[in-house]
Amino acid sequence: MRRLAPLLIALAAIGIAAAPHRAESAPAADSLLRGTAQIVYDVDPSERTRVTWDVTLKNNDPETVFREQGVVSFYDSYNLPLLRGAGNVSAVGPGGGPLAVTVRDQTPGPVV
């Protein structure tokens, strides 16, 4: 085991050095638009179950940065699954202003 220790330390050092550093590297293609969610279930046997779903989207896409000239891309929609029967569905932008929400009930099952 003593002979393996230097080799293991060297391999670990190489692995750490070769790993991408998040602060210095550009976002991966799959994290250009990153979403996180917090879901809270309030179960009360005398009432309906209330589900609160707080979703936050972070736009890391360099193509959507405001520029004075040239082409600026932007996201005009983002699809999220909802439980069938959801009510009071709303969305707000970064400044707290309301965003348009459309619910399309196109498939059978518990999710629309």
Image (cartoon, rainbow, N blue to C red):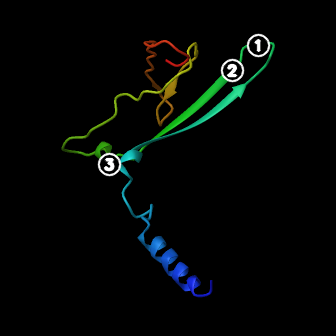
Q: SS class of the residue under badge 3?
A: helix
Looking at the rendered image, the disc whose residue lies closer to the viewer, 3 or 2, is 2
Counting from the top left corner in percent of width and height, residue 2 is at 62, 87
Left of 23 or right of it: where is 45?
right
Residue plotted at (58% across, 12% down): 85
Figure quadrant of the N terminus: bottom right
Residue plotted at (49% across, 12% down): 108
Q: Which residue is mark 2?
A: 50
Q: Which residue is mark 1?
A: 47
Q: Residue furthest right?
A: 46
Relative vertical location of residue 107 with respect to residue 21 in this rendering, above or below = above
Looking at the rendered image, the disc whose residue lies closer to the viewer, 3 or 1, is 1
Counting from the top left corner in percent of width and height, residue 38 is at 61, 36
Q: Nearer the viewer, residue 106 or 21?
A: 106
Left of 99 or right of it: where is 87?
right
Q: Are marks 2 and 1 in contact (CB under 8 Å)?
A: yes
Name the amino acid, label 2.
Answer: Arg
Left of 54 or right of it: where is 70?
left
**Mark toward the start of the polypeptide (3 vs 1):** 1
Residue plotted at (47% across, 27% down): 80
Counting from the top left corner in percent of width and height, residue 109 is at 52, 15
Q: Residues within 10 Å of mark 3 (few under 14, many from 20)?
A: few
Relative vertical location of residue 32 with respect to residue 76 in this rendering, above or below = below
Give the number of the disc on residue 62. 3
Name the amino acid, label 3.
Answer: Pro
Give the CA distance from mark 3 to mark 2: 38 Å
Left of 74 or right of it: where is 71?
left
Q: SS class of the residue under badge 2?
A: strand
